[in-house]
Image: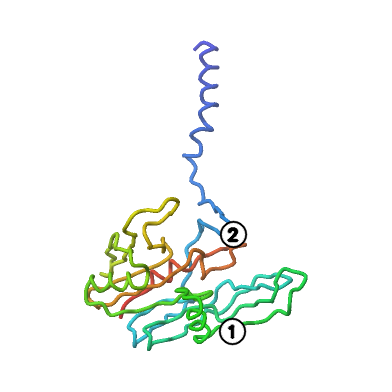
């Protein structure tokens, strides 16, 4: 073979290898981050072996809960803390709150007038008081799981419109292996200019609604735009996001 042909083949291989090498090597999943370092892709699965299995016999559901979650410490000097996760039952109102037991806060945090660091204990009464004053559907550092008796899809839709927005409609129903349906919403009506959602259904993907035709029950919870239950998001190598596993564990009993 002529020398110039050999040289051409070698040059072609050298140029081509960098292009195809990434496809030949199996890489670990990348850890990406968004605002404030929140991790999007998690390398390893969440270990739920130490989680608490909470069962509410009156409302008829079960869910697994992590014993601790990354807490809020709004005091100087700032530090990362883990806080116990606690259940607050409000069975008479068909609700259960799952939230961090306490957090730390200082008046005028981050200013030269910052006050004393205070440990604030959360309670069912404090959740109700805040909801009454602000009409918030999501408690601070927690979830409010609501269980409703619904004999059919018409009652499910009625509850959705009354509580999530009058223009919310059911976009789709995803059948799960356990026979429950996960309900996805969308808004009806004309889209306003610059409005990312339709009509008055502004929940986006920050909610979960599960409906069981067999049990004639539905579960709804507003999750919020940011994760509540997780490890320290500023440590991406060990970060774990708990909420998906919590929702997967939910069962009607």
Q: Nearer the viewer, residue 90 or 160?
A: 160
Label 1: element kind: strand
Q: Is residue 237 visible?
A: yes
Relative to 242, residue 34 above or below: above
Label 2: element kind: loop
Spatial distance from mark 1 to mark 2, Cα to Cα?
30 Å
**Placement of the C terminus among the 4 image quadrants:** bottom left
Image location of residue 36, percent across then percent down: 61, 59
- Circle 1 packing at 10 Å, graded few (<14), some (14-19), many (20+), is few
* Residue at 65% across, 73% down: 73
Q: Nearer the viewer, residue 187 or 117?
A: 187
* Residue at 51% across, 32% down: 19
- Please name the residue that numbered disc 1 is placed on: 121
Q: Nearer the viewer, residue 120 or 191?
A: 191
Relative to 173, residue 193 above or below: above
- Please name the residue that numbered disc 2 is placed on: 237
Relative placement, left or right, of 56 versus 32 is left
1 vs 2, front mark? 1
* Residue at 50% across, 60% down: 44
* Residue at 22% across, 73% down: 152
């Amino acid at each position: 073979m002529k020398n110039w042909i050999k040289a051409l083949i070698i040059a072609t291989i050298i140029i081509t290898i960098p292009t195809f090498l990434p496809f030949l090597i199996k890489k670990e999943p990348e850890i990406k981050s968004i605002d404030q370092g929140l991790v999007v892709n998690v390398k390893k699965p969440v270990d739920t072996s130490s989680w608490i299995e909470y069962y509410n016999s009156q409302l008829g559901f079960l869910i697994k809960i992590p014993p601790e979650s990354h807490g809020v410490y709004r005091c100087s000097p700032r530090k990362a803390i883990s806080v116990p996760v606690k259940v607050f039952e409000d069975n008479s109102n068909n609700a259960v709150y799952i939230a961090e037991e306490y957090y730390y806060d200082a008046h005028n945090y981050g200013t030269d007038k910052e006050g004393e660091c205070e440990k604030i204990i959360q309670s069912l009464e404090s959740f109700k008081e805040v909801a009454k004053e602000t009409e918030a559907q999501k408690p601070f550092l927690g979830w409010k799981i609501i269980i409703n008796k619904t004999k059919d899809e018409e009652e499910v839709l009625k509850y959705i419109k009354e509580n999530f927005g009058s223009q919310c409609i059911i976009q789709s129903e995803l059948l799960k292996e356990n026979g429950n349906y996960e309900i996805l919403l969308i808004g009806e009506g004309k889209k306003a200019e610059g409005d990312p959602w339709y009509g008055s259904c502004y929940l986006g993907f920050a909610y979960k609604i599960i409906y069981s035709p067999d049990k004639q029950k539905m579960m709804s919870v507003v999750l919020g735009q940011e994760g509540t239950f997780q490890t320290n998001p500023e440590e991406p190598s060990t970060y774990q996001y708990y909420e998906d596993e919590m929702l997967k564990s939910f069962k009607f009993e």
